[in-house]
Image (spheres, rainbow, N blue to C red):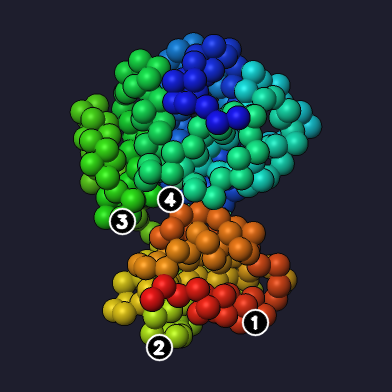
Amino acid sequence: MIISLKETADKLMAANSLILTAHVNPDGDAIGSCLGLKFMLEKLGKKVRVLIDDDLPKFLSVLPGIDTIEKPENESYEADYLVILDASLDRVGSVIEKCKAPRLNIDHHRTNDKKADFLYLDAKRAATCEIIYELGKEMGVEFDINSATSIYTGLATDSGYFRYSNTTPHTMRAAAELMETGIRPEKISEAIETKDFDVVQGMAKALQTIELHADGRVAGLFLDHELTESLDTTEGFIDQVRVIDGVDVAILLKAVEPEACRVSMRSKKTDVAKIAESLGGGGHIRAAGCTIEKPFSQAKTDILKVIEESLAE
Ligand code: AMP
Ligand code: MN
Ligand code: MN
């Protein structure tokens, strides 16, 4: 059932205990929205746990409360609601089987599968954290350094630090209001962008795989299984590809297993959410992803074919 922002706030306020979760392969928006909402709900006296069925990226270790996030280990978890943030129900791993509470889904992905018991979806928002900010206002919770740091992190990371086309005046106003708590954007971005030497070396290796296709309108990094295994992270690598002059669609393909490749796409003109959706994934018009259950070279051939057939005029 689709519900309004107010109905979402009412449900959260009426609950006593909540389990929050977000997508596997979590990013700043997934973790930022879980922690931001957790801090606000705790202020309202709720019992809140955050479960994420994956390892957390190191670049988010600066976030307050990150060490309270648990991996689902028990067989079952009880709560008044399971709140699924920044994803559809099929992208949260084992949490969905382990917690049978009514599913309250809060998301900004146009490709949301709408399978939750209750869904608040606003695809105009740059980040799920932008909705969490609105929920804070709706619930009448005052932002503090902890909630503001978490929410700001999701706003900043999903909007490319307020540079991508999903950035709106509303995104900027939300960020401005969060700054009133005393958070410092330069400190947050510096903490998030600081990389180990090995990661920069890994990026140098990955960048050597760069290829241009479709007369320079498509560019990609293609990381086979061996190279993928040698890298700690590929966070931000695709941004080096998106900036190439004349490139519409940027791809990062990595063989996470011998027979499974994760694909990230960014675009200037082409609707990549549509391409990702046709391959069982999803996302936004300018940033989307999917997993292709095939070996590296087959997956590479497949994705290039689909993209070349879908390029915008
Ligand atoms: P990424 O390339 O992983 O940064 O993802 C870009 C956007 O697409 C993000 O909003 C993701 O949440 C979304 N996305 C990535 N992979 C998937 C997937 N398999 N299913 C649905 N959405 C995805
Ligand atoms: Mn996300
Ligand atoms: Mn997001």
Q: Secondary structure at mark 3?
A: loop
Q: Secondary structure at mark 2?
A: helix
Sequence-wise, the earlier of marks 3 and 1 is: 3
Q: Residues within 10 Å of mark 1 (few under 14, many from 20)?
A: few
Q: Which residue is mark 4?
A: 59
Residue 37 vertical placement versus 202 (above, below)? above
Q: CA distance from mark 2 to mark 1?
A: 21 Å
Residue 62 placement (x, y as % from top left): 40, 41
Q: CA distance from mark 4 to mark 1?
A: 30 Å
Q: Which residue is mark 2?
A: 215
Residue 57 shows in this picture: no
User: In the picture provided, is 290 more to the left or to the right than 266?
Assistant: right
Q: Nearer the viewer, residue 168 or 74?
A: 168
Residue 26 placement (x, y as % from top left): 53, 48
Residue 306 placement (x, y as % from top left): 57, 75
Q: Residue at x 43, y 44 (%)?
A: 123
The label nearer to you, 4 versus 3, is 3
Amino acid type, mark 2: Asp
Q: Which residue is mark 1?
A: 297
Residue 75 placement (x, y as % from top left): 79, 32
Q: CA distance from mark 3 to mark 2?
A: 25 Å
The label nearer to you, 3 versus 2, is 2
Q: CA distance from mark 4 to mark 3?
A: 21 Å
Q: Residue at x 72, y 41 (%)?
A: 94
In this view, the residue farthest toward the right is: 75
User: Do tag 4 and tag 1 residues touch (Cβ < 8 Å)?
Assistant: no
Sequence-wise, the earlier of marks 2 and 1 is: 2
Total labels drawn: 4
Q: CA distance from mark 2 to mark 4?
A: 35 Å
